[in-house]
Image: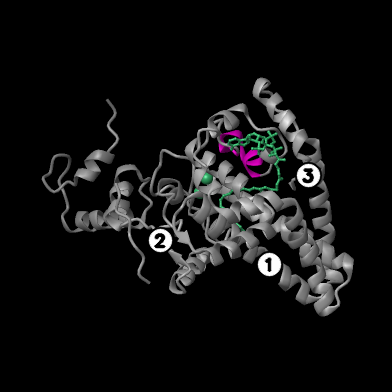
């Protein structure tokens, strides 16, 4: 693959007017205001998921379970390769058939329309882990995972978010079309059609199909996505920048089809791989973009040259990057072959001098 390398330095469960009115309220009153309609919707989803799991083990046809798992991951690609890497970060460009395809998948995933998703996500990067970050991980695991969707936004999100450039999205007719007709198209392709497919193709019952292919499939993909905002901002190492919250988290990368390499991603958000190594096993979103590149549907793929990564790793990394580990191993070998008599021996490494604890 020939990628061009850039070497530069709710469940929208509420009606819109109601949200707008209260959003204005949240600008003047900064106390946390619970949005009960969303709380109730999320409670319904999780109770229905428990029933769906029971159905999966007792009544469901195996095809329904496989279909739901595949649909959840495929729709996830509309989030990762589409809303995230293409539209939010402009990490590559896509011709209109690919943009249309990704917009359809993103609609199936039902995580708000692309415009709103991108606006929140750009604010998340630009004002990361402050009050202007919609899912500020400093407010804890629950808030950054699901809680942020149950309360009105902090006024800083709205005020500082207004400074984020969205002009590119306004110029994309596919994005604007999806925004305009979202509440017509989304219920149809995210819930009605996925429920009908198992019923029509292998005679599944309405109840099993609704609970597994719609509710379980949707809730599973939401949690896999939300783990990027919660777990991958809390658990894991920081080989690229130890001063920021986001981490490298392999489990999240697997569940979120390639988006758990979050320390790297916050340092280089314009890399289309959203990871350094682009290993397809833990990054199938990259595989899709590479395939689209081969078919001529994706172009201008941006990625970070290794010397830039290495410079950043040694400047701000936490020492867990493989190259740093190698350096350390090398020093230990050196130490083995060249025993030293003590402090100030000419063979004593600078690294050990730096790392030594000196009680003054
Ligand atoms: C969901 C999104 O789940 C998940 C995003 C995750 C991102 C993760 C990224 C990492 C990688 C992805 C991995 C994928 C893996 C896939 C794996 C698959 C197996 N800037 O929002 P409103 C203004 S969605 C600037 O209503 P409230 C604006 O004027 C789940 N301005 O605020 C706006 O009006 P308008 C389903 C902003 O009233 C006005 O404020 N969806 C910004 O406080 C009001 O905005 C839901 O559950 C900004 N950032 O309400 C919907 N934001 O829009 C839930 C707002 O007209 N949402 N403004 O321009 C809601 O109900 C509400 O948004 C609320 C806040 C209650 C949360
Ligand atoms: Zn993040
Ligand atoms: Zn991002």
Q: Which residue is mark 3?
A: 13
Would you say residue 235 is visible in this rendering? no
> Residue 119, percent across and down?
57, 42
**Label 3 secondary element:** loop
Q: Percent from the top left, x then y, of residue 185?
A: 73, 57
Closer to the camera in the image, 28 or 41 = 28
Q: Position of residue 302 (x, y in %)?
A: 38, 57
Residue 130 can be seen in this image: yes
Label the magenta part by its dominant secondary structure.
Answer: helix
In the orientation shown, which residue stands out farthest toward the bottom? 202
Location of the C terminus by quadrant is top left
Q: Quadrant of residue 234?
A: top right
Number of disc labels: 3
- Residue mark closest to the camera, 3 vs 1: 3
- Label 1 crowding class (10 Å Cα cut-off): few <14, some 14-19, many 20+? many
Magenta segment: 135-145
Query: Which picture quadrant has residue 100?
Result: bottom right
- Is 255 magenta? The answer is no
Q: CA distance from mark 1 to mark 2?
A: 26 Å
Q: Nearer the viewer, residue 154 or 220?
A: 154
**Residue behind label 1 places its C-beta within 8 angstroms of ligand 1:** no
Secondary structure type for disc 1: helix
Q: Residue furthest left?
A: 346
Residue on which the image places disc 1: 71
Q: Determine the residue located farthest toward the top in the rendered image.
A: 28
- In the image, the residue with mark 3 has its CB under 8 Å from the nearest atom of ligand 1: yes
The image shows residue 6, relative to residue 40, as above or below, that is below
Q: Nearer the viewer, residue 335 or 23?
A: 23
User: Which circle's residue, 3 or 1, is located before the other in the chain?
Assistant: 3
Question: Could you tell whether 15 is left or right of 171 in the image?
Answer: right
Which mark is drawn over residue 301? Answer: 2
Comes first in the chain, label 2 or label 3? 3
């Amino acid at each position: 693959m020939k990628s061009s390398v850039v070497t530069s330095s709710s469940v929208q469960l509420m009606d819109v007017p109601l949200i707008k009115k209260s959003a204005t309220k949240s600008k003047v009153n900064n106390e946390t205001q619970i949005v009960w309609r969303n709380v109730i919707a999320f409670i319904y989803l999780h109770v229905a998921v428990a029933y769906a799991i029971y159905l999966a083990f007792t009544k469901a046809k195996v095809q329904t379970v496989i279909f739901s798992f595949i649909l959840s991951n495929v729709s996830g690609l509309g989030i990762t390769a589409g809303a995230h890497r293409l539209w939010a970060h402009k990490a590559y460009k896509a011709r209109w058939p690919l943009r249309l395809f990704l917009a359809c998948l993103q609609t199936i995933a039902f995580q708000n329309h692309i415009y709103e998703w991108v606006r929140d996500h750009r604010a998340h990067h630009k004002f990361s882990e402050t009050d202007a970050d919609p899912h500020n991980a400093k407010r804890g695991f629950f808030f950054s995972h699901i809680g942020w969707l149950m309360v009105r936004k902090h006024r800083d999100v709205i005020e500082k978010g207004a400074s984020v450039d969205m002009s590119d999205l306004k110029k994309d007719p596919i994005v604007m079309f999806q925004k305009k007709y979202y509440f017509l198209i989304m219920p149809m392709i995210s819930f009605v059609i996925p429920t009908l497919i198992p019923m029509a193709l292998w005679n599944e019952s309405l109840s099993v199909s609704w609970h597994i292919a719609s509710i379980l499939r949707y809730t599973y993909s939401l949690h896999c996505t939300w783990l990027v905002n919660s777990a991958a901002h809390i658990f894991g190492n920081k080989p690229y920048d130890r001063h920021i919250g986001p981490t490298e988290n392999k489990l999240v990368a697997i569940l979120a089809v390639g988006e758990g390499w979050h320390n790297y991603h916050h340092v280089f958000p314009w890399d289309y791989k959203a990871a350094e190594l682009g290993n397809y096993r833990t990054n199938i979103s990259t595989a899709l973009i590479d395939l689209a590149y081969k078919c001529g549907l994706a172009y201008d793929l941006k990625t970070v040259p290794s010397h830039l990564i290495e410079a950043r790793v040694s400047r701000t990394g936490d020492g867990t990057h493989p190259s740093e580990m190698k350096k350390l191993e090398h020093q230990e070998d050196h130490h083995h072959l060249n025993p030293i008599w003590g402090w100030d021996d000419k063979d004593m490494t600078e690294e050990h001098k730096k790392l030594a604890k000196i009680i003054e």
